[in-house]
Image (spheres, grey):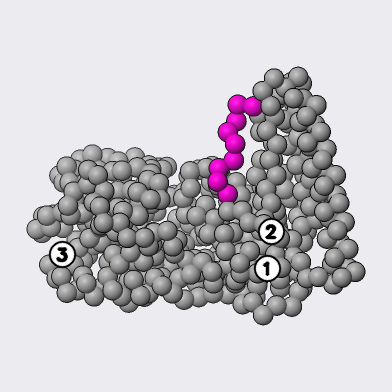
């Protein structure tokens, strides 16, 4: 088993070298216009939330958006015997992810061998891949990849660490403060997922506007499959909140707004979908002492197929956030024809347009008033649901991928007809 592992790794090294030589020959001698992009996919190895689904959907569409792209996906290329295999990945014939599992019964000490493989062999293989550029869809690339990066494209999802630092997990806050300004200074191009985020990047981080490309996100088509069955155990009527439960989501305002709505006659429930995040002591205390605590259900994190059913049967989605970089759950609810009530802040007015109700996040009673208005007016609810569905159709991952590919081509100086921005 030990010899077989090293033999398989040697074949990978030799194959990678010859693959790079063949690509050089095709490009220089035959004039083929292939563009090779390395991509950080570490978000796929955690419980998938907004950034992970953003990367997944863009990578799923990139090979169709541009047949000249070849993608090399990077996370841990080597795993110990007791570590899990990779999760499902958005692979295609022009997408590659290498993975070597150290077998059980390996004769050499596993920990030092794994340390050598990850600190020496991973960067070497990445260098041999000869990527034309590197795409970091989660703010900045892993440190271990930096030595092999020629040109860098990064996606910035929000700048809450500057706008609302008290709402950001301390470890994340420290990493962003230490690494994001330097990363953006080195990046050849920055993708912002909304006009609001782009403005923050320009104003708060001093990035030149010509390096910032606004590319809106899209709707996962799997959420559009109709689910007739009511999710098990849910109340017949409920309002929905979907996201990690964290301070910038304005959970205290959400709970108080729902409490005021119940006091005003709303007879349904509030369902929360998402795991508890960081710095949530105040929100958890608010929930525990709420006089309508028995009307609030917390479902934690849900797989996509379950979330689809929960979304489609909601009366409305509530998102009274202090700040959103884009607001993917809002667009996904709109795609299901669910009316949305959102804060009049950051990217949310940009995303919702006139297809939802905007409220002041600092005034929970405005949230309650919107809930009661929607609940008492079936015509308004139907109109907003239809408007939401139509607007959501404009947000397409195919177009986001085409614009992302356009950014890649321009960074390396290749002519292309692809756009380098996508705004609904």
The residue at 45%/61% (across/down) is 220
Residue 67: numbered disc: 1
Is disc 1 surrounded by few (<14), some (14 to 19) or many (20+) residues within 10 Å?
Answer: few
Are the two marked residues, 1 and 2, in contact with CB atoms closer than 8 angstroms? yes
Q: Residue at x 69, y 20 (%)?
A: 105
Can you tell which mark lies on residue 94? 2
- The Cα–Cα distance between marks 1 and 3, rounded to whole angstroms, is 48 Å
The kind of secondary structure the magenta stretch mainly shows is loop
Q: Which residue is mark 3?
A: 375
CA neighbours of label 2 inside 10 A, class few (<14), some (14 to 19), many (20+): some
Image position of 337 (left or right of 208)? left
Would you say 354 lies left or right of 102 here?
Answer: left
Q: Residues within 10 Å of mark 3 (few under 14, many from 20)?
A: some
Depth order, front residue of 391/141: 391
Given residues 248 and 49, the one toward you in this image is 49
Front label number (1 vs 3): 1
Q: CA distance from mark 1 to mark 2?
A: 8 Å
């Amino acid at each position: 088993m030990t010899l077989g592992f090293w033999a398989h790794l040697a074949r990978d090294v030799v194959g990678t070298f010859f693959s790079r030589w063949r690509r050089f020959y095709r490009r220089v001698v035959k004039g083929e216009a292939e563009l090779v992009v390395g991509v950080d996919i570490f978000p796929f190895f955690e419980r998938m939330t907004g950034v992970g689904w953003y990367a997944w959907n863009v990578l799923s569409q990139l090979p169709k958006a541009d047949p000249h792209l070849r993608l090399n996906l990077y996370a841990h290329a080597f795993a110990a015997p007791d570590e899990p295999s990779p999760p499902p990945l958005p692979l295609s014939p022009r997408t590659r992810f290498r993975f070597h599992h150290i077998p059980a019964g390996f004769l050499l000490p596993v920990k030092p061998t794994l340390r050598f493989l990850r600190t020496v062999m991973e960067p070497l293989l990445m260098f041999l891949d000869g990527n034309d550029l590197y795409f970091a869809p989660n703010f900045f690339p892993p440190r271990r990849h930096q030595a092999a990066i020629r040109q860098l494209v990064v996606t910035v999802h929000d700048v809450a660490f500057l706008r609302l630092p008290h709402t950001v997990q301390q470890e994340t806050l420290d990493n962003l403060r230490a690494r994001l300004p330097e990363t953006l200074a080195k990046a050849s191009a920055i993708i912002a997922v909304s006009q609001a985020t782009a403005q923050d990047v320009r104003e708060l981080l001093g990035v030149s506007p010509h390096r910032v490309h606004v590319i809106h996100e899209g709707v996962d088509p799997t959420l559009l499959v109709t689910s007739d069955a009511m999710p098990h155990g849910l109340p017949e009527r409920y309002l929905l909140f979907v996201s990690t439960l964290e301070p910038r989501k304005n959970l205290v305002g959400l709970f108080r707004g729902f409490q005021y709505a119940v006091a005003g006659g709303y007879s349904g429930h509030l369902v929360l979908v998402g795991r508890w995040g960081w710095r949530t002591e105040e929100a958890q205390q608010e929930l525990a002492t709420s006089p309508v605590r028995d009307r609030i259900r917390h479902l934690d994190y849900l797989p996509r197929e379950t979330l689809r059913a929960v979304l489609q049967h909601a009366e409305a989605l509530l998102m009274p956030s202090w700040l959103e970089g884009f607001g993917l759950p809002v667009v996904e609810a709109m795609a299901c024809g669910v009316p949305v009530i959102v804060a009049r802040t950051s990217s949310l007015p940009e995303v919702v347009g006139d297809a939802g109700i905007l409220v002041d996040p600092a005034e929970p009673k405005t949230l309650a008033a919107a809930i009661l208005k929607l609940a008492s007016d079936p015509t308004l609810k139907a109109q907003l649901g239809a408007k939401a569905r139509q607007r959501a159709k404009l947000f397409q991952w195919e177009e986001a991928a085409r614009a992302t590919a356009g950014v890649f081509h321009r960074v390396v100086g290749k002519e292309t007809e692809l756009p380098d921005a996508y705004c609904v």
